[in-house]
Image: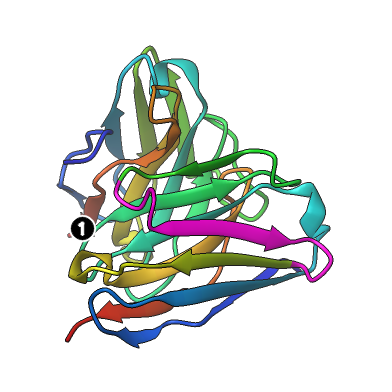
Amino acid sequence: EVQLVESGGGLVKPGGSLRLSCAASGFTFSSYSMNWVRQAPGKGLEWVSSISSSSSYIYYADSVKGRFTISRDNAKNSLYLQMNSLRAEDTAVYYCARDPGPGHWGQGTLVTVSS
Amino acid sequence: QSVLTQPPSVSAAPGQKVTISCSGSSSNIGNNYVSWYQQLPGTAPKLLIYENNKRPSGIPDRFSGSKSGTSATLGITGLQTGDEADYYCGTWDSSLSAGRVFGGGTKLTVL
């Protein structure tokens, strides 16, 4: 069974940093592209970033470009999102999701940016 | 403002059929596969349709997808109260700022 478990969310002050992790199991992690998608409270889905299976291709939404960095460790079956210079508008539940589709989503981790 | 345009809400009675539209452009829907997701309150999105019209295993055939030009449509027949949820379309956008895009979501109410 495919499982994606996010962690690392929490309360952080504006301008601060946070690193999200996503632990994958139940499939060959190194064979799939992965994504981060977020959802602000009461709002719709917003794509954040994608990374190909070997990290050769990386894409970011304009709203996070230059502040967020996606990475993966295929040996550890893990996906990461380093978030710097956080703003109030980054407050959201962050989901990791596996392609194609994305067809499998984690349960999400809440990031709250507030002073 | 979402790149893909969906109606904010649709409604229908139990047992009836409903369709949800998703409008885009040549850089996204026009040249890429469309996926559809169902999000029940307080839960993660769930893939209903991928590659325009394919259903993952376990998704009933009451759910269907289609695409024509730069628009896509999700159809749900035999509506059940358990279908009340938010529905999102999504695809890849191949423009200068390449990336995945989603519709703003459609709230389905089963009256």
Q: Position of residue B77 (x, y in %)?
A: 39, 43
Residue ID at (59%, 42%)? B55
**Quadrant that contains the N terminus of chain B:** top left
Q: Is residue A32 above or below residue B3?
A: below
Q: Position of residue A30 (x, y in %)?
A: 80, 54
Answer few, some or many: residues within 10 Å of disc 1's Cα (few below 14, many 20 plus, some between 14 and 19).
some
On screen, residue B45 versus residue B1, left or right, reads right
Residue ID at (29%, 32%)? B22
Q: Is residue A101 above or below residue A110?
A: above
Q: Quadrant of residue A86?
A: bottom left
Q: Position of residue A115 (x, y in %)?
A: 17, 86
Residue ID at (37%, 61%)? A38
On screen, residue A104 versus residue B110, left or right, reads right
On screen, residue A80 versus residue A114, left or right, reads right
Q: Main secondary structure of the magenta part?
A: loop
Helix, strand, or loop for circle 1?
A: strand
Q: Is residue A9 above or below residue B6?
A: below
Magenta part of the chain: A63-77
Colouring rule applied to residues: rainbow
**Quadrant that contains the C terminus of chain B:** bottom left
Pick the front one: B105 or B63: B105
Pick the front one: B75 or B68: B68
Residue that label 1 marks: B109
Q: Position of residue B52 (x, y in %)?
A: 51, 29
Residue ID at (54%, 63%)? A96
On screen, residue A23 versus residue B13, left or right, reads right
Label 1 is found on which chain of the structure? B
Q: Quadrant of residue A75?
A: bottom right
The kind of residue tagged 1 is Thr
